[in-house]
Image: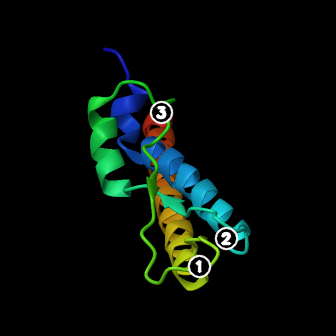
Amino acid sequence: MGFSFDKALGVHPQALALRLSRAELLSANLANVDTPHFQAKDIDFAAEMQHSQWQFSTSSRPQEMYRVPYQPSSDGNTVALNVEQVEFTKNAQDYQTSLAFLNMKFTGLKQAIEGK
């Protein structure tokens, strides 16, 4: 009988990778809050997770979308500091949650291997 880590771990490795990619985008947005003409980007997490169910390679980059600003700025920058901070914080919390689920999966696998 074969064992598959993909089946045992579920979607959690993909969720972690996607959360990490999103954190990189959001931190770039925050770092460029004062850069003229910088265009804030984000990803649609739910759509990307759904897409990853049909995709066999986890190495592809998620589709980035430009964020539509609530209020245009005079220098063309679309980063809204408060929006980016909230999104970054929510993403970090979701990353920790995914990490906790993955940890529980590994703990369960370890117990199964040890016969507990």
Going by the numbered disc 1, the residue's amino acid type is Gln
Q: Earlier in the sequence, mark 3 or mark 2?
A: 2
Question: Residue 114 location in percent, x, y?
Answer: 50, 36
Residue located 38% across and 22% down the image: 3
Quadrant including the N terminus: top left
Residue with the most extreme front position: 74
Q: Quadrant of the C terminus?
A: top left
Task: Describe the colour scheme in one phrase.
Answer: rainbow
Which quarter of the picture shows residue 63? top left
In this view, the mark in front (3 or 2) = 2
Q: Given contact means CB atoms under 8 Å apart, are the residues at marks 3 and 2 in contact? A: no
Q: Residue at horizontal 51%, vertical 50%?
A: 16
| Front in this rendered view, residue 101 or 48 | 48
Report the residue marked by disc 2.
30
Say which label, 1 or 2, has the lower sequence index. 2
**Residue at horizontal 34%, vertical 37%?**
52
Q: Which residue is mark 3?
A: 113
Q: Amino acid at mark 3?
A: Ile
Tags 1 and 2 touching, CB below 8 Å: yes
Residue drawn at the location 71% of the way across and 67% of the way down = 32
The local secondary structure at tag 3 comes to: helix
Instruction: Point out residue 83 in the picture as x, y percentages from the top left corner.
Output: 51, 80
Q: Nearer the viewer, mark 1 or mark 2?
A: 2
Q: Secondary structure at mark 2?
A: helix
73 up-or-down from 32: above or below = below
State the separation of the CA atoms marked 3 and 1: 42 Å
Q: Secondary structure at mark 1?
A: helix
Q: Are marks 3 and 1 in contact (CB under 8 Å)?
A: no
Q: Residues within 10 Å of mark 3 (few under 14, many from 20)?
A: few
Is residue 110 among what the camera can see?
Answer: yes
Q: Which residue has dot 1 on it?
A: 85
Which one is in front, 48 or 112?
48
